[in-house]
Image (tube, rainbow, N blue to C red):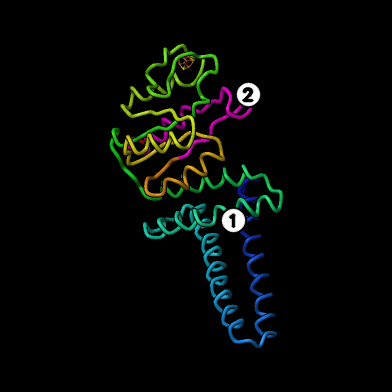
Amino acid sequence: MRKDEKRFLFILIAIVAILVTISMISVFFLFLESIYVMRFLLIVFLFALSILIITIIWIIFMLYRISSNKEISSKKYKFLRRILGVVYPFLILISKLFKVDIDSIRRVYGKINNILIKTKNIRVSNEEILVLLPHCLQDSKCEHKITNEIRNCKMCGKCDIKDIVNLSNKYNVDVAVATGGTLAREWIKKKKPKAIIAVACERDLASGINDVKVIPVIGIFNERPNGPCFNTKVDVKKIEEAIKYLLKEE
Ligand code: SF4
């Protein structure tokens, strides 16, 4: 298990431990307090907590199954995706509390999302795929406006946009560049894709995956050798692999 994955598991277990502690404190009050309303509220609270604890333990078990390359049913896949979306804000909160590197949690979250999508055996046609890119992939000195139309790129090769345009031509898939979450959402509304390949930093990708619940999103993290949001890079091979996977050309 890698460092990022260990941290992720640690945060999940920490959430369970915190919830168990809260439950035990509640049980203590339950026996201490004789007022009926208070007891009733505590019972409801304890019931909700127990469900939450069982759910998180189930998530850990499912993640273990997935990491051992075991198949999960479509129903479990949908439930797991939904429940992870609910648990995600808690993961971030507890990571902050324990001062765990949040990006490593987001990276594992993105990886789990990709693995989950691959268990679903999706197959779409090239017109149904949308590749969403962050604007920071473009060379900062480039004067060509690619946010409306990526084909405005003059293919000089100073940034990865050139190779992505070539990919788009090769597989005939749509590529859109977004300067932020709002524009990304607009592209999705406009293009109505059945599958998305999104390139972004850990934070944007994790929140994007959570935003777009109904469409499968394969996430690819960008590389930031020049610092955040500036002349970033991406492994174009990973985008091609994702396209081939969705087209079932692997
Ligand atoms: S490859 Fe395209 S987007 Fe990148 S710097 Fe050259 S012209 Fe601009």
Q: Nearer the viewer, mark 1 or mark 2?
A: 1
Residue at the image point whose x is 60% and y is 83% from the top: 39
Name the residue carrying label 2: 226
Q: Quadrant of the C terminus?
A: top left
Residue 17 rendering spot, x and y as whole percentages:
66, 65
Residue 2 rendering spot, x and y as whole percentages:
62, 46
Q: Quadrant of residue 153?
A: top left
Task: Specify the segment rendered in magenta.
Answer: 219-248
Residue at the image point whose x is 54% and y is 14% from the top: 141
Residue 137 rendering spot, x and y as whole percentages:
51, 24
**Earlier-in-chain disc, 1 versus 2:** 1
Q: Is residue 109 visible?
A: yes
Residue at the image point whose x is 56% and y is 64% from the top: 57
Secondary structure beneath disc 2?
loop
Q: Amino acid at mark 2?
A: Asn
Q: Which mark is residue 20?
A: none
Residue closest to the eye, 53 or 150: 150
Q: Is residue 181 depicted above or below 9 in this figure? A: above
Q: Is residue 113 depicted above or below 43 in this figure? A: above
Name the residue carrying label 1: 90
Residue 21 rendering spot, x and y as whole percentages:
68, 70
